């Protein structure tokens, strides 16, 4: 990772984690130059890339600030990584790294860690907990042929889902599993699904930031006549 990418990764981690809220000022270029010991061009390249991605807004005289979201809500589909890979014409495989039943306050849960690979490189690390009270048949499933997320989508209906997008720097174990450098930026998707108020599963998917992005498309509805 070159210095410009490192500056960008450090700032993006603070934005995506929610540490820096919309409107939060990004340190001035001269401050970043002093912090990282680099030239203005290096800093400018990092800021320009974030502006192009819509993460920051450059304002004349006021400086650069964290961009405001275009909407307060986002609805994301629950993606099937195997099916998604097939649509893209890319090979896919998954490996179960860990599987165990654990006790929890609400009842037993099946804990499964899965490595997803697309093409010839890791795509995501999945750390999932499945409520065996809600989905008892999962206890007998090995998930060797079908990954846990795909199996759940095929066998269990859900009525409510929650998604939280975040960011983290890869520690040694995560870096080794995803084939990236220690400290490299990663995107996280924490998701929980319910059926009629009963929790089915909770999962964290961690993606290398340079191999994945989250995209949502919104349609602006026309305001009613006379609305101020």
Image (cartoon, rainbow, N blue to C red):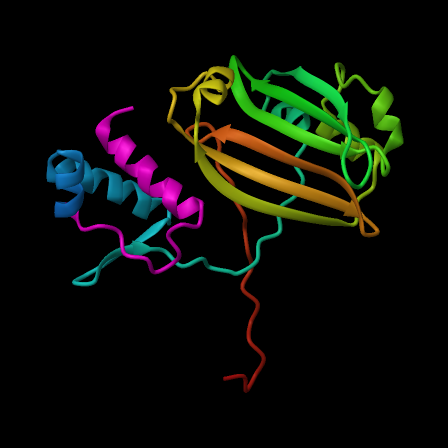
| Percent of width and height locating residue 6 | 28, 31
- Residue 84 appears in view: no
Which residue ends up furthest to the right in the rendered image?
137
Q: Residue at x 30, y 38 (%)?
A: 8
Number of numbered callouts drawn: 0
Quarter location, residue 13: top left
Residue at left offset 76%, top offset 35%? 104
Q: Is residue 25 left or right of residue 18?
A: left
Residue at left offset 32%, top offset 51%: 56
Question: Measuring 20% from the left and 63% from the top, which residue is drawn there?
Answer: 62
Going by the image, does 14 lie left or right of 163?
left
Q: Residue 61, relative to residue 96: is it above or below?
A: below
List the single residue furthest toward the bottom: 226
Residue 128: where, in percent of width, then height? 68, 30
Which of the two residues, 89 or 107, is positioned nearer the viewer here?
107
Q: Which residues are magenta?
A: 1-29
Point out residue 117 in the picture as x, y percentages from the top left corner: 57, 18
Residue 109 in the image, given as x and y percentages of width and height:
78, 31
Left or right of 205 on screen, residue 67: left
């Amino acid at each position: 990772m070159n210095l410009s990418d490192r500056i960008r990764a450090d700032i993006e981690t603070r934005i995506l984690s929610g540490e820096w809220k919309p409107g939060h000022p990004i340190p001035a270029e001269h401050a970043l130059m002093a912090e990282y010991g680099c030239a203005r061009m290096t800093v400018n390249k990092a800021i320009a890339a974030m502006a192009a991605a819509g993460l920051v807004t450059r304002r004349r005289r006021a400086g650069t600030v964290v961009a405001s979201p275009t909407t307060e809500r986002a609805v994301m589909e629950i993606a099937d990584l195997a099916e998604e890979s097939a649509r893209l014409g890319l090979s896919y495989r998954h490996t179960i790294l860990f599987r165990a039943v654990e006790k929890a306050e609400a009842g037993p849960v099946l804990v499964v860690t899965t490595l997803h690979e697309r093409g010839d490189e890791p795509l995501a690390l999945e750390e999932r907990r499945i409520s065996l009270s809600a989905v008892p048949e999962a206890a007998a499933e090995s998930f060797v042929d079908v990954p846990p997320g795909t199996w759940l989508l095929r066998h269990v209906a859900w009525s409510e889902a929650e998604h939280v997008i975040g960011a983290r720097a890869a520690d040694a174990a995560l870096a080794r599993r995803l084939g990236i450098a220690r400290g490299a930026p990663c995107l996280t998707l924490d998701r929980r699904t319910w059926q009629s108020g009963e929790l089915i599963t909770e999962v964290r998917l961690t993606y290398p930031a340079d191999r994945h992005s989250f995209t949502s498309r919104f349609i602006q509805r026309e305001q009613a006549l006379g609305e101020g």
